[in-house]
């Protein structure tokens, strides 16, 4: 059993914990052939996922490289990755010539995508989410690919359903979600046509101290802003657990792709989460809206069974977040907008 700290002191401690590889991942990396390349590694999850891959390979005594690819508009993020032993390449992945110049790698983790700002710039969202996957598949046709997708490809599910399983008929709402289904279709096409082993990760929702669905709710309670309960239920998983599951999926790639939900085992009620934060902060909480009979919910049982059980339960995440925000810990300022029901981001 992983020993969890009572509190997370600072960003350095947080990123160490988020990138700490579980033993099952170390065993998996011991068996890994070929280098690992992470496309879109400069986002919210990418840096700690890259660091976790590197740490797992070192512990496994496997000398394969980890290569992080991103535009790296934040030089500090690139320097931090290099200090962790991760190689970096600055690259605009929408430029075909730049993709062609990337070194060969047998294991690709595709994290690139566009969500927020899609309304009004739908064409760029479709280019990032469908055209780019096609170019990546052509460039790395001899490798295996783990590609991040999203639970937004599912319809809103009845709150007592346990969430959408991987066999649920897809019904994306809005252009962003439709483009994500397009991304899955493009990857599946190339997997079938070129026999590329793949796994599609439908994530719903990763959380840590600086962002996530739980942070969104906590910040509202702390600011004494009314909490909207229209989207009355949600999924939440510790980002470190999601990182490990995505890297574990490299061993489960197949053609056609293996599709798997990455989500926590619990269906959390927004009203209860807000009430817990109100207790932890010692503040009142006010609610607005009426709970709908459905919500964006994923059933994570298959992923948890094959890729490993989560190490951090929601209760611990909430206590960490409350402590972090109370002490003025930094956040990324990127709300998830999980309450959105019309698909407009």
Image (cartoon, rainbow, N blue to C red):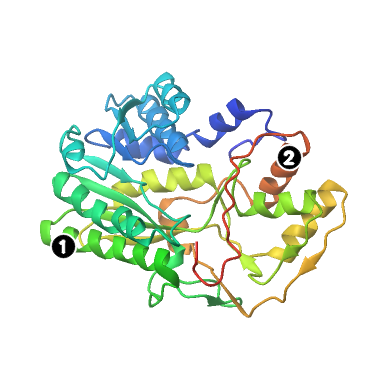
Q: Is residue 5 left or right of residue 32?
A: right
Residue position marked by numbered label 1 in the rendering? 192
Q: Quadrant of residue 119?
A: bottom left
Q: Residue at x 63, y 35 (%)?
A: 3
Q: CA distance from mark 2 to mark 1?
A: 47 Å
Where's residue 178, x and y in %? 37, 68
User: Which quadrant holds the N terminus?
Assistant: top right
Where's residue 113, x and y in %? 37, 51
Say the numbered circle drawn on residue 299: none
Around disc 2, counting alpha carbons within 10 Å, would you say few (fewer than 14), some (14 to 19), or many (20 or more)? some
Where's residue 317, x and y in %? 66, 46
Q: Residue at x 23, y 61 (%)?
A: 186
Residue position marked by numbered label 2 in the rendering? 325
Around disc 1, counting alpha carbons within 10 Å, would you say few (fewer than 14), some (14 to 19), or many (20 or more)? some
Outermost residue to the front: 120
Q: Quadrant of residue 165?
A: bottom left
Q: Is residue 267 visible?
A: no
Sequence-first disc among 2 and 1: 1
Outermost residue to the top: 83
Q: Is residue 27 left or right of residue 116?
A: left
């Amino acid at each position: 059993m992983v020993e969890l700290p009572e509190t997370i002191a600072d960003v350095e401690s947080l990123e160490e914990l988020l990138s700490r590889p579980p033993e099952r991942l170390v065993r998996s990396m011991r068996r890994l052939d070929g280098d690992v390349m992470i496309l879109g590694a400069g986002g919210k999850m990418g840096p700690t996922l890259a660091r976790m891959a590197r740490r797992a390979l070192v512990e496994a005594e496997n000398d394969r490289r980890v290569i992080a690819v991103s535009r790296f508009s934040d030089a500090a993020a690139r320097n931090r990755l290099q200090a962790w032993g991760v190689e970096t390449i600055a690259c605009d992945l929408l430029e075909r010539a730049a993709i062609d110049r990337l070194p060969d790698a047998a294991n690709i983790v595709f994290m690139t995508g566009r969500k927020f700002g899609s309304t009004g710039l739908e064409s760029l969202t479709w280019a990032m989410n469908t055209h780019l996957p096609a170019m990546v598949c052509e460039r790395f046709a001899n490798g295996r690919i783990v590609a991040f997708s999203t639970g937004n490809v599912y319809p809103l599910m009845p709150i007592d359903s346990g969430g959408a399983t991987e066999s649920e008929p897809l019904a994306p709402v809005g252009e962003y979600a439709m483009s994500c289904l397009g991304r899955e279709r493009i990857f599946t096409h190339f997997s079938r046509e070129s026999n590329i082993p793949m796994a599609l990760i439908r994530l719903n929702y990763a959380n840590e101290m600086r962002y996530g669905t739980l942070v969104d709710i906590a910040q509202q309670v702390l600011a004494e802003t009314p909490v909207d309960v229209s989207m009355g239920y949600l999924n939440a998983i510790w980002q470190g657990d999601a990182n490990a599951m995505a890297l574990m999926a490299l061993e489960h790639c197949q053609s056609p792709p293996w599709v798997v939900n990455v989500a926590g085992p619990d269906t959390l009620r927004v009203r209860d989460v807000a009430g817990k934060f109100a207790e932890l902060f010692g503040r009142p909480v006010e609610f607005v809206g009426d709970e709908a009979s459905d919500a964006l919910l994923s059933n994570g049982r298959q992923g948890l069974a094959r890729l490993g059980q989560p190490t951090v339960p929601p209760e611990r995440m909430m206590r960490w977040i409350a402590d972090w925000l109370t002490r003025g810990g930094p956040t990324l300022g990127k709300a998830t907008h999980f309450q959105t029901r019309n698909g407009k981001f």
